[in-house]
Image (cartoon, rainbow, N blue to C red):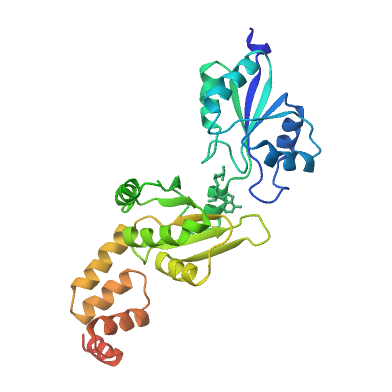
Amino acid sequence: MSEENRGRLYLSATPIGNLEDMTYRGVRMLAEADLIAAEDTRHTRKLLSHYDIHTPATSYHEHNKLTKGPELVEKMLSGAVVVCVSDAGLPGISDPGAHLAQLAIEAGIQVSPLPGANAALSALICSGLDTTAFTFYGFLPKSSKKRRELLERIKCSPETLIFYEAPHHLKETLKQLCEALGEERPAAVARELTKHYEEFNRRSLGELLDYYQANEPRGEFVLIISGYDAEKATSTQQAEEVTDPVQMVEAFEQQGLSRKEAMRETAKKLGISRRDVYNILLKA
Ligand code: SAM
């Protein structure tokens, strides 16, 4: 078959909550395709009827990908245009799709994205944390050994970390993250993105754990965690090591605390009054 007559595979984003989050192109391509390969055809049907799309849909998911993938490739080799979608967001991101893309590429079929909603990046950009470099981990491994190993490996990664988590595991995961990365680590939890109860909870890991211990987690969650700040860790360690109030105030100031806050922290650490710290600083 000539290159022109070959079909094509599109991997299309679908909304992560708000049905309006489809691009014009995404809607048109879903309507014009020969076949939609959907993670769950009943779920995708709601989206298709919202946009009055009548393209036939077939199921393609984790449990049938080994048989369904080659069938879809055959269809594309015979000229069919297939759009692959998952239940929400980008196929291939903690969802089926990547395997079909690999099969299609191996068969010489053109594979193209139809970009759009994605929970991880939507959460990241509104987290208030560093967006210049980040690592997406999706769901943490289920096995506690693998989980511990991963957390041990990434505890000093300087990049922002992104995780997906189910509501019934959120508290346990936050607890493990506190143990591995420290309660002070700045973080943000994004809940129910693009939906009615969308919420951003920007606090330290320890505060987030306290919050969700008091407020039962409900809905869908993305966890964004600040990377390891080596400079801050060093100055905290230095502040902990010094016992001289003047040096301690300076070390706290280097961490970004104001003079007043640094004096308060120093007084607390040394078990003396703020006035004493003030007088020592004056003499120095
Ligand atoms: N393919 C999707 C994407 O591109 O974002 C991710 C699918 S993964 C199976 C589902 C997980 O994504 C949820 O458990 C949750 O962690 C996250 N998620 C999906 N929709 C979300 C939303 N509206 N708000 C917050 N998190 C969401």
Q: Nearer the viewer, residue 30 or 169?
A: 169
Vertical placement of residue 19 versus 178, above or below: above
x then y, percent, for residue 12: 64, 35
x then y, percent, for residue 236: 27, 68
Quick one: quadrant of the C terminus?
Answer: bottom left
Which residue is located at x 36 percent, y 59 percent? Answer: 176
Query: Residue 82 appears in which quarter of the rendering?
Result: top right
- Relative horizontal placement of residue 13, taking residue 262 as reference (left or right): right
x then y, percent, for residue 271: 24, 86
Vertical placement of residue 144 versus 67, above or below: below
Vertical placement of residue 47 versus 79, above or below: below
The mark total stands at 0
Quick one: quadrant of the N terminus?
Answer: top right
Q: Nearer the viewer, residue 235 or 19?
A: 19
- Relative horizontal placement of residue 31, taking residue 81 as reference (left or right): right
Q: Nearer the viewer, residue 169 or 94?
A: 169
x then y, percent, for residue 149: 30, 47
